[in-house]
Image (tube, rainbow, N blue to C red):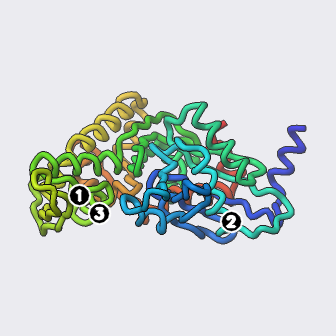
Amino acid sequence: MKLISKVLDKLPTPSSKDLAMDLGTANTLIYVKGKGIVLDEPSFIAINTQNKSIHAVGMEAKVMWGRAPREIRIHRPIRDGVINDLEPAQLMIKHFISKTLSRIRILKPRFVICVPSGITQVEMKAVIDASIQCGAGKVHLIEEPMAAAIGAGLAVDRPQGFMVVDIGGGTTDVAVISMGAVANSQSARVAGDEMDKAIVQYVKENHHMIIGDLEAEEVKIQVGSAYSQDEGESYPVRGRDLVKGVPKEVRLNPGQVAEAIQGPLQQILEIIREVLNDTSPELQSDIHRGGIFLTGGGSLIQDMDRYIEGYIGVPVRKVEDPLTSVVKGAGRALEEFQRFKKAFIT
């Protein structure tokens, strides 16, 4: 049976359209074998609570966050990089897959799903069950930092250590990779969402104003910085005055945003330190020579690489196109399945 399975793995799968999926807290990306990235949408779904029908998915649902009428409920079914609301997650995934794959399929497709390094057995089962419900024939899981390393073009199958720090929307994953597998890793549920919450809290305490999560996210994108001394150009932030209860606007500069997000940033530094501390001297030497590779949406915050390098004392390099490196790596692992077989979670 094992021999048959190995032979089948090597055979092409006509009409099955195997795919790789980065099921992220912020965005879901899908890579179809032979085509590349075919979908990049926010991980949001709007459901009509009266008739249980899908009202909107992706960007159309995201813009409704905080604005929808009472009969429309907006869900973010992926939290901290894993499924936390199964039924809306299945509906969202099915919708995305139907947009990317033909309805006529001779064989069930193979799914490669990216997951955080710290995923539990229960969370793994939820991902696998959701994938099977959405039409998968076989499901393979790959840790996000491993996928990011492959997507960045690192020679992960060599006897050489690489460190990848993937700062996403819900989780930060730090992994040391060598010889095609993860040698050491840690995942923490502190990333972009926690930075947004920190900005909301900062505005509340310092400007006596309430802002929404999406407003905080936009501030982070526009003027987010890791260094508090960098004032730069300010950005308008709109919300509700806590005292008067009327609309209000203030302006935040990069230095103020940096001050707001120092808590989450310090937690990310601590994770990196812990992983390095638990890594062998030989791999540490490789990392010091080759540097730390930074990926994910959090890497786009101004001076994030310089911030980590200054505290850790190891060169930090942003990967090319950090928002898509994870799904590109998962897609490459799908295309070259035998070469990267050790990269999958068993």
Q: Residue sitting at 68 percent across and 51 percent down?
A: 339
**Closer to the observer: label 2 or label 1?**
2
Residue 265's spot in the image, x, y percent? Answer: 26, 44
Helix, strand or loop at mark 2: helix
Residue bearing mark 2: 98
Q: Is residue 306 visible?
A: yes
Q: Amino acid at mark 3?
A: Glu
What is the CA distance from the residue labelled 3 to the residue labelled 2? 30 Å
Residue bearing mark 1: 303
**Closer to the observer: label 1 or label 3?**
3
Q: Amino acid at mark 1?
A: Asp
The vertical placement of 183 against 11, above or below, is above
Residue 97's spot in the image, x, y percent? Answer: 66, 62
Residue 237's spot in the image, x, y percent? Answer: 19, 63
Helix, strand or loop at mark 3: helix
Q: Amino acid at mark 2?
A: Ser
